[in-house]
Image: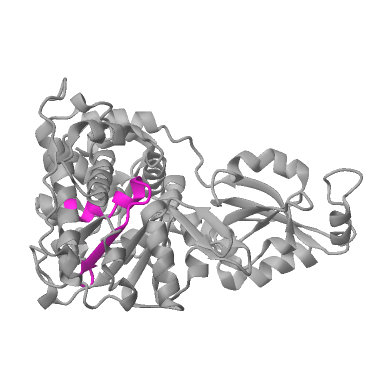
Amino acid sequence: MIEKLRNCFDEMVVYKDLQKSNFFSALSLPSFMRDWLLKKFEDEAGRFDPDELARFIRVYLPRKDDWTAIKNRVVVEHERVKFLAKISINIDIKTGEVSFSLPDFGLSSRDTIIEDTVWQACKEDLLHSRETWGMVEIGYRPPDHCSGYGAEPSAGRAREAGHGKIKLTAFHPFCPYTIDLEYFKDVRREFTTAEWLDVLLGAVDYNAKGYLGDEEKKLTMLTRLLPFVEKRLNLIELAPKGTGKSYLFGRVSRFGWLSSGGVMSRAKMFYDQSKRAEGLVSGHDFVVLDEVQTVSFTNVDEMRAALKGYLESGIFTVGSYEGTAEAGVILCGNIRKELMDEDGFGNMFEELPSVFHESALIERFHGFIKGWNIPRMNDDLKISGWALNSEYFSSIMHELREDMSYRAVVDELVEVPESADTRDTEAVKRITTAYLKLLFPHVRSAGDLPVREFKRYCLDRARNMRDTIKYQLGLLDIEYQGKDLPVFRVRSNIEGAQ
């Protein structure tokens, strides 16, 4: 299969050796950054010069501790400095001035400027998302320097003219190639379903051989990727320690956000009234509350109300501000061995924070991942060989979120029982759609996929994930007891279905 993988994906395949090499683990780089570097420095045999790569990292991947030295070079020495960073853009409505921030270094938009000539050159790359990874080059605009937006600056700009600012002088996007989503979809036809599961595992740094052919364990691991490809998919996962939850959600994709324990507020999650800034759900594909048992909330009632509204509709209201977002919310926590229940018949939510001890909130989570079906991380499960570039694959998953055609296929294929609860229907269909995107991206119509495969890999798994939530609701609230999940079936009269 490796030869097929390399032939089909060509330069989007890199050699990853996480079993033997300590080079990258010592750097603590996310997977998308590591694979970007591998793609840049590896030869056709997968070899790279560690010294050359280390020199590049020292120059272009500064640490937070290096920021003072960078400011000295820019502000005092008047150098232009180039490095890889995450950048976000701010457009001032009152003055028309465009500025930027570098969140990882604490540089805010108050102290920066993007002059018009630079903005015109790079705005197409900077306007795609709230935060963008790329190679930034910064310089210094001294005090009393004209803004560059025209010969006659506005009153607002004139007031700013007395202050020096760090300016963006150039930007090149982190992704140096165009994502061909249609090619990715079409090339899936070259692989069997079993092979494709292994391709996906390798793309997120896991060695398929370490699962010893256990398809259920592979699929449970890949279930964690569903919020990467489907908008506003809300999941709960409880798993034993050491199964890799934090790694997959926090290190694979640059489009998600992992929050581990600590304090979470409505302002941080949704909207900060004092800063007039939207929160985590507005800037990411998914937000994960990891180690959820240790998360505390500044105001439980306030947070519960905000979560219920957002999980239901994607709309959040804080004060007079109403916003919309598309991030899924995932709760991840550890579970004690005695609470693990293969059939989901034990009360698995009893250790969750009190904010989640309400059935109306839990019902808004679409499905449950049984993390105990995922083996504890060991060296055999770490990728060692040729695999899809994680940076490329995370971009593909991000692009798949926008494709509505898969939901149309699901709507055509799934028969909804009479009087089915709307939330159950939406949950089952949303999870089914995510599985379809992930496992069968080549599907264009209901007739492109054998019904038995659609049922086995998409619909049945979605039903099981929702059924666990349904049963747990009965343990939380007597009102839900005895309300079984309706039986969603595949329509038998689909024209062209195999």
Q: x%, y% of residue 263?
A: 44, 77
Q: Is residue 225 magenta?
A: yes
Q: How many marks?
A: 0
**Which residue lies at the image location 13% right of the left edge and 46% below the top edge?**
460
Look at the image and name its color scheme.
one colour
Q: x%, y% of residue 126?
A: 60, 45
Identify the image quadrant of the C terminus. Answer: top left
**Which residue lies at the image location 18% right of the left edge and 39% below the top edge?**
416
Query: Can you see residue 28?
Result: no
Left or right of 200 on screen, residue 278: right
Left or right of 256 on screen, residue 275: right
Q: x%, y% of residue 471?
A: 14, 63
Q: x%, y% of residue 185?
A: 31, 31
Q: Which residues are magenta?
A: 219-242
- In the picture, residue 451 is in which quadrant? top left
Query: Can you see residue 303?
Result: yes
267 and 34: which is toward the camera: 267
**Which residue lies at the image location 31% right of the left edge and 65% below the top edge?**
361
478 and 262: which is toward the camera: 478
**Which residue lies at the image location 32% right of the left edge and 56% below the top edge?**
234
Q: Is residue 255 magenta?
A: no
Q: Is residue 250 above or below residue 197?
A: below
Left or right of 341 on screen, residue 334: right
Identify the image quadrant of the N terminus. Answer: top left
- In the picture, residue 370 is in which quadrant? bottom left
